Amino acid sequence: MIITFALPNGMRIIHKYTPSPVVFCGLTINTGTRDEQEQEHGMAHFLEHTLFKGTSKRKAYHINNRLDNVGGEFNAFTTKEETVIQACVISADFARAVELIADVTFNSIFPPHEIIREKQVIFEEIDSYNDSPADLIFDDFEDLLFDGYPIGRNILGTKKTVKNFSTKDIMKFVDRTYNTDQMVFSSVGRISESRLKYCCEKYFGEQTANFRNFSRVKPENYKVFDKSVRKKTHQSHVILGNRAYDYNDKRKTVLSLLLNYLGGPATNSVLNMSLREKNGLVYTVEAGYSSYNDTGNVTVYFATSESNTEKSYSLVMKELDKIKTDCLSVYQLAKAKKQFIGQYLIAQENSEQIMQSMAKSMLYHNNCESTKALIKQIETVTATDIRNVANEIFRNDMISKLEYL
């Protein structure tokens, strides 16, 4: 059973009732890296960290212990477009979790001494990320793919920008971007409708309405690139791809199915069979798709020894050419669909993931599409649909490449 309603201040609520005594809940805010101004690069992520450092009625110590003391969990994360503050508790402590989420979201005071300390934590996180080429290359690729647009910038920011953040800067960012009409509280677990409404109205309903008055900049210009960077790593890391469909595009399902067939998590994906199982060239090869509110990107990534880079790249392009030329057989298509649906249904057993996906659906569609409807979308995909999307996304003259040597 799905329950949805809205509060007078514009906040939306969505809940899925399950018999589980464990409740996953979270506040998803439609604010991320792409909403930062140039001098604010890294602010959304830094803000997420400092939300836990003190409110008008709690110190950092009390925030950290509020749910820990009852065996619960409290955490947050930032993406290019969203900030999520979430908790996991037994159902008896649901009100405690909702109150804490509301407190850090609306009452944080960002103490200067805590900000100074947290900057060092972020600096260490930036250094750690720079030491991980398999992660860094994805951010660098997006930066080039969306060159000149905020959505291309990495989430962490730079030491230079983060160093300059002050309490005043953080509060200014909160006032501008933490808009109540851009917030969705979602939860999954054994919570009745009456209890849900009571808690949300008590802790969220009294918050002052703050509606969004700015629009995001949609990336337009795209210049294909082929870039190599000397990193002195043990392996060559290669990523290639293109811009792709946004979160609302109906072709998103076709593209997701295609990429799962090519380089999804299963060991029998086309690229894994070709590069790893048949030729022993790589340990990791994967295809991925990130959809945003008004754009998206597709990537194919692999890591191999420098001497095998060209051969691995040739095999990837060979498989892409094949999927653009030949339609999948009836058997291949049926197997690809069954695998994709199976992976989706297994993922639906993860309450945390359900909670997050419901919130995102409410943010952008103002509803939550049923599992039955999503499966039907997958089942209606044809081999021609897949070939057409492959030819559009993997056009040779539109594919960009970034390589770490």
Image (spheres, rainbow, N blue to C red):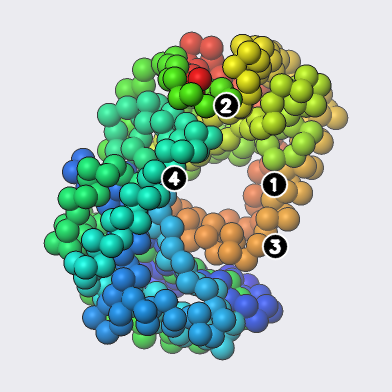
- Distance of mark 2 from mark 4, alpha carbons? 17 Å
Looking at the image, which residue is at 27% across and 44% down? 159
Disc 4: which residue:
128
Say which element carries label 3.
loop
Q: Is residue 388 visible?
A: no
Nearer the observer: mark 2 or 1; the answer is 2
Looking at the image, which residue is at 58% across and 76% down? 23
Nearer the observer: mark 4 or 3; the answer is 4
Amino acid type, mark 3: Glu
Return the mark for residue 234.
2
Disc 3: which residue:
349
Q: Nearer the viewer, residue 213 or 266?
A: 266
First along the sequence among labels 3 and 2: 2
Residue sitting farthest toward the left: 168
Disc 1: which residue:
376
Amino acid type, mark 4: Ser
First along the sequence among labels 4 and 3: 4
Say which element carries label 2.
loop
Amino acid type, mark 1: Lys
- Distance of mark 3 from mark 1, alpha carbons? 19 Å
First along the sequence among labels 2 and 1: 2
First along the sequence among labels 3 and 1: 3
Say which element carries label 1.
helix
